[in-house]
């Protein structure tokens, strides 16, 4: 009966040799797995955007209820900001958030680690694509988060409408109340949440 032979294997050296001989395949497989998780995080961010009260209110147009509460329950964001009736102000944001995330995988190091570079949509991209309908150079998205003035001069008519207004429902008047615009985290938070998800991969 043949006797068994016991051998000892240097696991660390064997691991390094496996990594060295399979670097291209390892890099490709790591990128594929990371891309899958990134896409999942992107879809979750898209759902967060669609569920946000600001998005819902703006998507409902000039007749929307003040879902977000940012104008104190009076009128709505669509007419206060002054969008043209029939326009879709959130669509540029939606288009940016729907872009497939680009990733680049570096070479595999001897310890098996791979550096993945992820190119994300930036807040600046979104700010540039969301100018006020009456003023270029500034973004209504930034206004949602930092404040929009003149709520005290805002007049909203949900019944007869206002023929001289962009939205058909509201105008700025000489009336001056003490009402002030409330701010809320919006796109910057969604992007920040997205980045947090990526750091947990």
Image: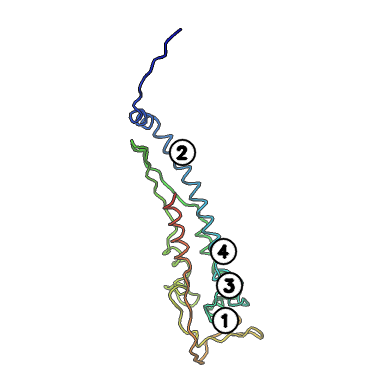
Rounded to the nearest angstrom, the CA distance separating label 4 from label 1 is 21 Å
- Residue bearing mark 3: 57
Q: Is residue 67 above or below residue 180?
A: above
SS at badge 1: loop
- Check whether the beta carbons of the residues at disc 2 and disc 3 lie within 8 A of each other: no
Spatial separation of the CA atoms under disc 1 and disc 3: 12 Å
Mark 2 to mark 3 CA distance (whole Å) = 42 Å
Sequence order check: which comes first, mark 4 or mark 1? 4
Q: Which residue is mark 2?
A: 29
The residue that label 4 is drawn on is 50
The percent coordinates of residue 181 (x first, y second) are: 48, 81
Q: Tell me the quarter of the picture where residue 157 sits.
A: bottom right
Label 4 Cα neighbours within 10 Å, binned few <14 / some 14-19 / many ≥20: some
Sequence-wise, the earlier of marks 2 and 1 is 2
The residue tagged 1 is 73
Direction from residue 14 to residue 87 in the image, left or right? right
> Which residue appears at 38% of the width and 32% of the height?
19
Count of numbered marks: 4
Determine the residue positioned at 46% across, 38% down: 29
Cβ atoms under marks 4 and 2 closer than 8 Å: no
């Amino acid at each position: 009966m043949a006797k068994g032979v016991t051998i000892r294997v240097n696991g660390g050296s064997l691991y390094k040799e496996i990594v060295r001989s399979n670097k291209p395949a390892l890099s490709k497989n790591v990128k594929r797995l990371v891309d899958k998780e990134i896409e999942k995080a992107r879809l979750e961010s898209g759902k967060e955007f669609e569920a946000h009260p600001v998005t819902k209110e703006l998507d409902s147009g000039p007749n929307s209820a003040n879902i977000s509460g940012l104008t104190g329950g009076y009128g709505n964001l669509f007419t206060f900001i002054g969008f043209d009736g029939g326009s879709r102000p959130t669509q540029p944001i939606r288009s940016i958030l729907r872009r497939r995330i680009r990733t680049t995988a570096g070479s595999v190091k001897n310890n098996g680690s791979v550096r993945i570079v992820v190119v994300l949509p930036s807040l600046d991209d979104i700010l540039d694509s969301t100018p006020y309908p009456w003023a270029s150079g500034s973004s209504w998205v930034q206004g949602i988060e930092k404040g929009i003035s003149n709520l005290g001069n805002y007049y909203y008519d949900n019944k007869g409408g206002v023929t001289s207004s962009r939205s058909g429902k509201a105008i700025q008047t000489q009336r001056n109340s003490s009402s002030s615009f409330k701010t809320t985290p919006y796109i910057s938070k969604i992007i920040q949440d997205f980045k947090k998800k990526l750091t947990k991969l």
